[in-house]
Amino acid sequence: MIKTGIEAMSFYTPHRYISLATLAEKHGIDPEKFSRGIGQEKIALPGHDEDIVTMAAEAARPLIDRYGTEGIDTVLFATETGIDQSKAAGIYVHRLLGLPANCRNVELKQACYSATPALQLACSYVARRPDRKVLVIASDVARYDRESSGEATQGAGAVAMLISADPKLLEIGAVSGLFSEDIMDFWRPNHRRTPLFDGKFSTLRYLNALIEAWRDYGENGGKAYEDFARFCYHLPFSRMGEKAHRHLAKSAKASLDMEMALPGMLYNRVVGNSYTASIYLALISTLENSEDDLTGKSIGLFSYGSGATGEFFDATVVSGYQEHLFTQHHQAILEDRVPVSYEDYVELWGAPVAKDGEELTFEVEARGRYRLAGINDHKRIYVDTRA
Ligand code: CAA
């Protein structure tokens, strides 16, 4: 059987953040609630000239620079925070990256989950067409109402993955465990910028979906708990991953080793929730922050999207994977960031929305190569500042 999976992957997050210590102080909350109770330190904040498209292009750029565009004939863009009801965000990215015109583009939605079906569809496609590659992008701005319980779990980021029949990082296993149920734990009607959610209920349904998906994975011939060296979870906040890992170990009647999940939480702790990108940010964090050599080892992944769908699947680390990581680039992105004051956070949180046909021009805030210059005549104007 043809091996398919992730040839390379890279992430991007904006250069500004608010520290959760600042948020705690402003709201008179014990900072330990956020650092230990939620397990988060920072919330990444896009400028007004940054969005899911600019972050996606920034995330994908290093992949294109290193591996080229040859063979890419499909862009699958996963997001919860779409910018248009009709046009796929990937089409803007397609142009910004200079991808071949003979390429399909589509956007996928199911809360935080949709990058996982994108990855699975891409693997199936390249198994049929091993000469082709698929660019899978997950990009989101997680923005909750201020002073809601979700406020501390905001964030923003994008992950880009090159899927091919020459997986240099991770081979994706053919077996999945699946679970869906129709619930209202977190949703966002078309007229709202921020989600409606039932926080505690959502955490309980997440854990239930994990166990149901894990059971289905086992029944479909998946690996045993003992076969895994690491686990990656969808991380709305890193403490959710700890709860999930504890829950899974208990369900599998295995002894708990939190070290199997902790390397995957390091980047997410300082980025915040990035919805569709979150589990793949955890996967990058696992590969880049595990001290031991993971060659040949199995990673278990649990992807969750409220509403709800969960999927458990596995990936096997490919020999020589270290040469295909972007560790220094990623660490530079995280280290070069600057904190903002509470007042600046409030200003950034209220990203301007163009009223019907209004012209908006945005100041240069983005530090990356791509930015949203403005909105005019209902059209978003994206620019490559190096073009
Ligand atoms: N020191 C240490 N720990 C403290 C503390 C302190 N001073 N004060 C509180 N804590 C602990 C609490 O004991 C609690 O721990 P447990 O979970 O172990 O009980 C934890 O901090 C959180 O405290 P609360 O339960 O009081 O927190 P909260 O009411 O503010 O809500 C939340 C927590 C419900 C997760 C909230 O952050 C939320 O609504 N988030 C948005 C929804 C969400 O992320 N859901 C996750 C599942 S859905 C999903 O995954 C999809 C998605 O991406 C949205």
Image: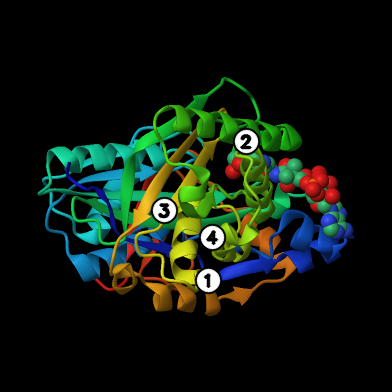
Q: Which residue carries the number 4 mark? A: 264
Q: Nearer the viewer, mark 1 or mark 3?
A: 3
Picture coordinates of residue 145 (x, y %)?
Answer: 70, 45
Location of mark 3 (residue): 298
Can you tell me whether the CB of the residue at mark 2 lies under 8 Å from the nearest atom of ligand 1? yes
Amino acid residing under circle 4:
Gly
Question: In the image, what residue type sits under mark 2?
Answer: Tyr
In this view, the residue in front, 123 or 151, is 123
Q: Are marks 1 and 3 in contact (CB under 8 Å)?
A: no
Of residue 14 and residue 382, the one placed in the foreground of this image is 14
Q: Within 8 Å of ligand 1, the CB of disc 4? A: no
Above or below, comparing residue 287 to residue 196 in the picture: below
Q: Please determine whether, in this image, residue 41 is positioned above or below residue 308.
A: below
Q: Is residue 72 left or right of residue 49?
A: left
Residue 386 percent across, percent down from the top left = 28, 73
Q: CA distance from mark 4 to mark 3?
A: 14 Å
| Sequence-first tag of 4 and 3 | 4
